[in-house]
Amino acid sequence: MLKKFVDPLPILKTIRPTSHIQNVPFYEVTMQETFQKLHRDLPPTKVWGYNGQYPGPTFHVQRHQPIHVLWKNALPERHFLPIDTTVHGAKKNNPEVRTVVHLHGGVTPDTSDGYPEAWFTRNFRKVGPHFTHRLYTYPNHQPATNLWYHDHAMGITRLNIYAGLAGMYIIHDREETRLNLPCGPFDIPLIIQDRSFHEDGRLFYPSVQDKTAAAPRPSVVPEFLGDTILVNGKVWPYVNLEPRRYRFRILNGSNSRFYRLTLSNGAPFIQIGTDQGLLESPIRVPSLILAPAERADVIVDFSTCFGESIVLQNEYERKGEKPNPETTGSVMQFRVVNSLTCRDESSIPVHLAPVPKLTQYQQKRTLRLNMRKDSYGRNIHLLDDRLWSEPVSAIPKLGQTEIWTLINETQEIHPIHLHLVRFQILDRQPFDRDVFEEEGRIVSTGPRVPPALNERGWKDTVRANPGEVTRIIIPFGPYPGLFVWHCHILEHEDYEMMRPYMVTR
């Protein structure tokens, strides 16, 4: 077992524009293979990174200042992780290594959204059926928020992100700056991911689900759970801190793993933001649940902790079992050992940002989260019982607001993500699964439960719990076009739990 807390936490580098085009910052980002030391006791590990970095460099952009990004693929032509060619989009006649970048949570036109079939290969030799261009424009008209960018190529998203293709994208604005939150070196993004390794340092990713099954080899697996936790690309790192307030912008960038984050000294998190920006007011929470792709913006006060070593723990229970504190139950360590470099003059304001509650809508949709068996006996998770290749069925109108009722018939939590839009959670309600399966009727078995206080901001990813109806309210806009919605468990998304939707004028 690798020793914990022996490597310092990497502070993610900021990417700078290479030039300007008519006063719009222009960036070039190249996807490259590299070898990186992910733990003191591991040989360098082969990874794929944006500009050769895993995780990729962090974009810091200003609201209302658009940017152009030219995404370039300089990766090898063969993948180093196991590809299941029975998965849609990954057939043998498609190139093994294909990439397309999605700015997760970005409000962008569809031509810059990273549609899964808009992929391209090394040096731009081949392109997918929906390809438009690889120069993307991000308008950045959103309020201050923590987004992330990652690969979204059809049928191999789980492998490309696992290989290292992910990074943070942070939008700043004047309103947030005026709040006097911790900033500069006291504002630290944390990308949490899980990985497994071979003894020689190579990344391990399973190639079969069930060795006795008749499934192809390699075969897509229903989920991936690594046996080590990485933060900013290091296994179980530590960071030396001062006794003061810190802001942490936390992203769950794992393929399938959920986290319930706690601090070993029992201190609370002061949550100030969620996926799509600031909450109305700070919320004091003893723990943070994050599904894959969810973000939490928090402040932790270490002012009375000088001399302490505090572990950021994971206490998320799976099937009634908590993770082993010696392995996946630990995330990283905070060492409050540095002297104050300056007085802490940051503050936590009572009011953060307006979050007007949505109530008016023009359309309702009821959508099932279900599953069935494929021809090999493997489970396929589906959205509304439809495969990716079936015709578009959700066609909201530009400028209209809809309520989507998600009926989770499965035994798993599905983090559902919609491209283009931000939304609010209305409520969750348990239902009688047996009645629904036999008669197709929703019979509730309990009251509607409003979202937790720290879920009452703007979201782009919602946890739809098994045996529950989850209702979200979504304003569609500001752009028309072709987008997608999907489960953000990457193994589900790659194997059919993703659907296109079209916003029309």
Image (spheres, rainbow, N blue to C red):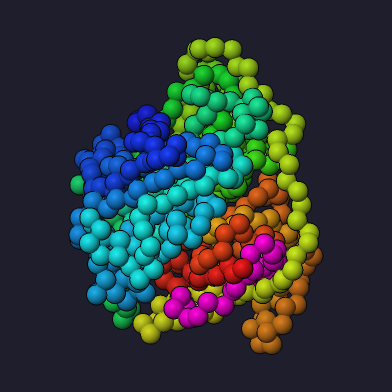
Residue 389 is one of the magenta-drawn residues:
yes
User: Could you tell whether 48 is left or right of 266 in the image?
Assistant: left
- Residue 353 vs residue 377: left or right? right
In the rendered image, the residue lying farthest to the front is 22
Q: How many marks?
A: 0
Residue 372 percent location from the top left of the image: 49, 80
Does the segment drawn in magenta span residue 28?
no
| Residue shown at 56% from the left, 31% from the top | 247
Q: Position of residue 146 (x, y in %)?
A: 54, 42
| Camera-side residue of 397 and 144 | 397
The residue located at (44%, 27%) in the rendering is 239
Foreground of the two, 462 or 474: 474
**Residue extent of the magenta highlight:** 387-407
- Residue 408 appears in view: no
Q: Quadrant of residue 97?
A: bottom left
Which residue is rendered at x = 72% and y = 71% of the image?
Answer: 363
Whole-percent x, y for residue 427 in the image: 73, 60
The residue that appears at 45% across and 49% down in the rendered structure is: 137
Residue 306 can be seen in this image: yes
> For residue 178, which quarter of the picture?
top right
**Camera-nearest residue between 218 and 89:** 89
Judged by its main secondary structure, the magenta piece is loop
Q: Position of residue 322 (x, y in %)?
A: 53, 51
Pick the quarter of the image with the C terminus: bottom right
Residue extending farthest to the bottom is 439
Which quadrant: the N terminus? top left
| Residue 447 position by quadrant | bottom right
